[in-house]
Amino acid sequence: MTPVPGPIILVALPLAAAITTYLIRRWAFMAAVIAAATAGALSLLCLYLPLDRSAFVLGQEVGFGRPVVILGRDLVLNPGGQAWLAFIFGLAVVFYLFAWRISQGQSFTPFSLAILGLYAFVVLLQTFSLAVLAFAISVTLAVFIIQGGRRSSIRGAQRYLLITLLSVPLLLTAAWLVDQSLLVPENADMARQALLPAMLGFGLLLAVFPFGTWMPALAADAPPIVTAFIFTTAQAMAFYLVLDFLRDASWMLTDTALSTVIQLAGLLMAAVGGLMASVQRDFGRLFGYAALSDLGYLLLTLVMGGSQGQVLALLHMTNRALAITLLAGALAIIRHRATTDQFAGLQGVARRLPIATMGLVLGCLALAGFPLTAGFPTHWALGRAVWNWALPFSPLAQTAGAAAGAATGGQWAGGLVLLTLIIASSGIVIGVLRGLSAMLGAGPREDIARQPIVASFIVLALAALVILLGLYPQLFLDPILNATEILSSF
Amino acid sequence: MEAFSTFFELMAGTPAIIGLLLTALVIFLASDWRLSLAALLVQYLLVGLALARFIEPEVAVVKILAGVLAVPILYLGARHSHQTDEPEDSAEGGLHLLGLRVGWDAGPLGLPLRLLAVLLLFLILVRLLGQFQPPLAPAGFSIELAFVAIWMGSMGVIGLVLGGGPLRSATAILTILAGFDLVYATLERSLAIVGFSGTLTLLTALSFSYLAAVQVVGLGKDKPEQDGAAP
């Protein structure tokens, strides 16, 4: 019997589950179970099935690495894509469990499954241009889940859609220029011309400063779990597209102008996000700005982490996903029970919903890189890297061949960067303390229903994981190192 | 048949290019959604017509079809939400043209500023046109087409910057994508790309149509909360 090709499973299963859950969308439990089971099964398949040979799953032979031709294009799963999909499908399981207990809109389950199917398609496609178009198509579908709460404000969804669509022409142009330079050796200089559209396109896609204004707007408008879905899985896919592009244009990594721009943009994002988080009056926007600030850290780890930059960035992405999921879960409970996330309307909520409040505070602190939380290790490593850069006679400065005078300049710049990072983290902490102070005020709110058991249990489990990763950051290090090794060879 | 072919060839040249310049201009200037959508429809027909000189006619027809289908999708959303998307100042007194106030006190979204923006952009593009060197000109690639594509893209970007509701944004972003397609379709002939970009056009229209509709539904739903009744 011919083995079932892996790409077919990865694309068809989420799409079939999307249709099924759409038909039964009124039965939240059934829809959540089907969605969580589908995402969980796909995550496990990605984690355990080999690509170089067939394996038996429930008595059926599966050739996970077997290529398929659809619409004249080869769909192939490579090891890097396999690790990426395992991460994304795994995260989705937690989102669906939350969506079962706290509704995120009836469209969330079917549309998010369709989006996951498209993400699998993005990973399987071997042509970058098609992958960009498939990702843009997934964003048009994301609009339907962002507005699932049917709020009148469409600012977040509209900005997200526009920013992503604007990146499409730029990325397609960059890909075409790189392709031409590879196909015809005489056009080698065209690769240089790809730098500007690629930089702008990926800047838009990754919400790099100043294109990240959609993040707080979306966090304010969309249901919290939907926000987490976009901030984790969609941004992880955008990051995957960057790696996919760099596979053919690896010289860009060594371009000093590019790394300076990324460094500056990351620093601005971290600073602006942190400062804005400190003055917000609702947890939705605070969530958006904290995530924006943390995204700035992600960019900084990539360029300032030295030889360990990619490991640090992947570790940060994993920890960030965990912190965002915890924060979104806690916020979902609070919005559901208190019907608002405005500080002014949350007086006394902390005593009525202690677990959700704890999750909310812990999630924000993790995004700020507070000690003993999952965000701390990478924030600390980045701080150390900046400190080393700032020291005049540090090994890093010496290997760069910097003269003593230049090193003194670097010391000032490094000190300034470090100070900015501390201010950014402090901004998030101040913002969450302001919110906590409001939630602790007045007596317990008797008009608010007690905390939901299952959702609170998930929040507790996530909170425990966030603290555990803060205490033992090496816990995920082995899989991250493996993933980095795979990605650098892919 | 020969007469039709001659007429088609004639129309696909300069008239199509002038038509594309004008439709992008109308989409940018008009605030009446009916006029914008009509211009968008004509724009898609002209994009297909202009492309038919460079690519296979079947592919050009697919592009026309995707665009022509996108317009009714937007129309449905616009019909549903026309009360919110109606220009706010249309209810006020004063002279109006294309649904926009004409007087100098018309504000940042009024016709005078838009006309000024168009004039500046036109001068910049004409200045740049003489220096423009395409990185790799394939057979049949015309500089006029590149100029129109840049014009459409610029009109779309300024339209987005000046802002507006979902329908204004939809017509602006679709103009940008159509302008880009005008050049990209001549460079990248893959049928898969044609299919994917057609799907993207349709889904973009659907998303904006949904946003326009949901804005109205959400406004109705949010009202009790604003009155303080919901909590």
Image (spheres, coloured by chain):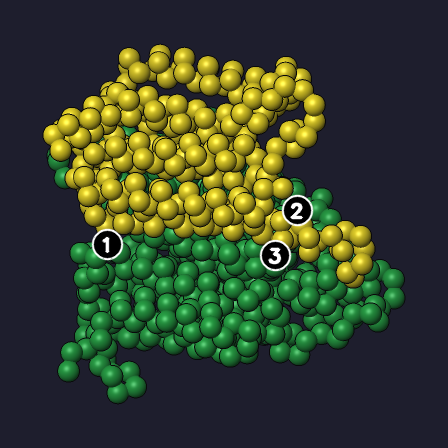
Chain colours: A green, B yellow
Query: Can you see residue B195?
Result: yes
The reply, left or right, for residue B204 in relation to residue A420 is left
Q: Between residue A64 and residue A386, name the one nearer to us.
A: A64
**Mark 3 element type:** loop
Q: Between residue A379 and residue A461, name the one nearer to us.
A: A461
Indicate the amino acid at tag 1: Gln
Q: Mark 1 points at which residue?
A: A126
The reply, left or right, for residue A426 in relation to residue A206 is right
State which tag comes first along the sequence, 1 or 3: 1
Name the spot of residue A161 as percent of width and height, x first: 48, 46
Q: Residue A150 carries which label?
A: 3
Indicate the amino acid at tag 3: Arg
- Whether label 2 touches label 1, CB < 8 Å: no
Q: Quadrant of the C terminus of chain A?
A: bottom left
Query: Can you see residue A195?
Result: no
**Which residue sits at x=45%, y=59%?**
A233
Name the spot of residue A153 as percent of width and height, x first: 63, 48
**Mark 2 element type:** helix
> Do callouts 3 and 2 point to residues on the same chain?
yes
From what the image shows, is residue A231 above or below residue B14?
A: below
Cα gap from disc 3 to disc 2, whole angstroms: 25 Å
From what the image shows, is residue B35 above or below residue A482?
A: above
The chain holding disc 2 is A
Q: Mark 2 points at which residue?
A: A277
State which tag comes first along the sequence, 3 or 2: 3
**Which residue sits at x=76%, y=73%?**
A449
Cα gap from disc 2 to disc 1, whole angstroms: 40 Å
Nearer the viewer's eye, disc 2 or disc 1?
1
